[in-house]
Image (tube, helix red, strand yellow):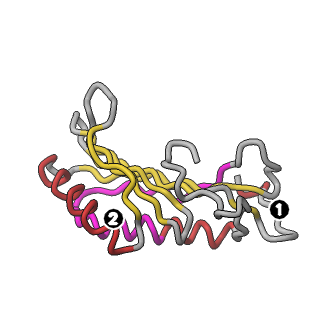
């Protein structure tokens, strides 16, 4: 998974999990909604939904990933910092494994949280951007999935 910790990848046997595209999109919506609820912020939220992407080096008619970037903005930075701290503390209680928390390596040293939902095979990265316009930006992404036999995902991209 690009930009994710990778811990939510394929099963321990190395097999690529089978998942229906609609079910995977639904999982992404549910996980993003859960994360937003856990943040507890009352600001503006971007409206884009989960998208389908290709698995590099795989047959794009059978293999796919799900990605769902979204942001919360128009919230004071101190509230966003507190929300990030609360998210870090609550994620393990909701089936997430925290894999990173702290400043990133950018010039601005943005506070960044990374976590895996191993049950659903998704990972999330949440960054606090303090510069104007300030926002929390989340990128939810899945492992590579294989569509069920007979399902062609080409039209989903």
Residue 123: give x, y in percent of width and height: 48, 57
Few, some or many C-alpha atoms within 10 Å of disc 1 (few <14, some 14-19, many ≥20)? some
Please give the range of residues in magenta: 30-53
- Check the image and name the residue furthest to the front: 13
Give the left or right position of residue 141, taking residue 130 as reference.
Answer: right
Q: Mark 1 = which residue?
A: 152
Few, some or many C-alpha atoms within 10 Å of disc 2 (few <14, some 14-19, many ≥20)? some
Does 31 appear in magenta? Answer: yes
Residue 141 vs residue 91, the one in the foreground = 91
Q: In this view, does 20 lie above or below 135?
A: below
Residue 87 vs residue 16, the one in the foreground = 16
- Check the image and name the residue furthest to the left: 78
Q: Mark 2 = which residue?
A: 36
User: Quadrant of residue 132 in the image?
Assistant: top left
Residue 138: give x, y in percent of width and height: 39, 51
Residue under the point 70% across and 71% down: 20
Residue under the point 58% across and 48% down: 1
């Amino acid at each position: 998974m690009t930009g994710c910790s990778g811990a939510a990848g394929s099963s321990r046997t190395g097999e690529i999990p089978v998942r229906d595209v609609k079910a995977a999109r639904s999982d992404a919506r549910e996980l993003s909604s859960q994360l937003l609820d856990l943040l507890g912020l009352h600001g503006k939220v971007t409206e884009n939904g989960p998208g389908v992407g290709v698995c590099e080096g795989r047959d794009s008619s059978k293999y796919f990933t799900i990605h769902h970037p979204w942001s919360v903005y128009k919230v004071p930075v101190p509230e966003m910092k507190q929300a990030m701290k609360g998210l870090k503390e609550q994620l393990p209680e909701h089936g997430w494994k925290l894999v990173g928390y702290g400043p990133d390596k950018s010039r601005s040293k943005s506070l960044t949280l990374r976590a895996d939902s191993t049950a659903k095979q998704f990972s999330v990265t949440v960054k606090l951007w303090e510069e104007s316009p300030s926002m929390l930006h989340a990128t939810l992404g899945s492992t590579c999935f294989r569509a069920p036999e007979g399902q062609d995902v080409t039209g989903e991209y």
